[in-house]
Image: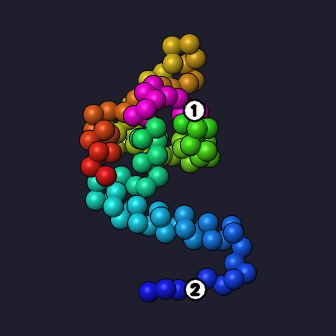
């Protein structure tokens, strides 16, 4: 079914519609695996950058620090990641994906 968009639809509104629909579809797929669409990006990043910090993940994925903190907390509760205090700065944590996190990511 083709639903035409108004010709004067702002670009930002169109991007918002695309983003929301992408997340709906991704959540349907990843929900069966026990993770949300928001958890996929950080897990993928951790496969390429083991021992990344929460701040680094936030910066690289351009996700708000508070949002990434909530996501990291949920991933830790699910057993997908573990946080290890940085030896040089005790306020900083290295985020490490667990075997369970890798399995969930590869099933998505």
Q: Label 1: which residue?
A: 56
Q: Quadrant of the N terminus?
A: bottom left
Residue 5 placement (x, y as % from top left) = 61, 82
Q: For this view, does 102 lie left or right of residue 62?
A: left
- Whether residue 12 is situated above or below residue 48 in the rendered picture: below
Q: Which residues are magenta?
A: 46-55
Tag 2, which secondary structure? Answer: loop
Residue 57 lies in quadrant: top right
Q: Earlier in the sequence, mark 1 or mark 2?
A: 2
Q: Farthest residue toward the top?
A: 88
Tag 1, which secondary structure? Answer: helix
Residue at screen point 57% across, 85% down: 4
Q: For this view, does 11 lie left or right of residue 40?
A: right
Badge 1: how crowded within 10 Å, few (<14), some, or many (20+)?
some
- Whether residue 76 is situated above or below residue 9 in the rendered picture: above
For residue 58, say whether it is visible. yes
Residue at screen point 43% across, 48% down: 39
Q: Nearer the viewer, residue 42 or 74?
A: 42
Residue 100 lies in quadrant: top left
Q: Label 2: which residue?
A: 4
């Amino acid at each position: 079914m083709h639903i035409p968009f108004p010709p004067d639809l702002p670009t930002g509104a169109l991007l918002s519609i695309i983003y929301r629909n992408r997340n709906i579809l991704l959540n349907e797929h990843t929900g069966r695996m026990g993770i949300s669409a928001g958890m996929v990006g950080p897990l993928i990043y951790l496969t390429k950058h083991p021992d990344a910090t929460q701040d680094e993940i936030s910066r690289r994925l351009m996700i708000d620090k508070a949002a990434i903190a909530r996501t990291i907390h949920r991933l830790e509760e699910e057993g997908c990641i573990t946080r290890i205090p940085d030896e040089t700065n005790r306020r900083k944590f290295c985020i490490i994906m667990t075997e369970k996190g890798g399995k969930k990511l590869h099933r998505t």
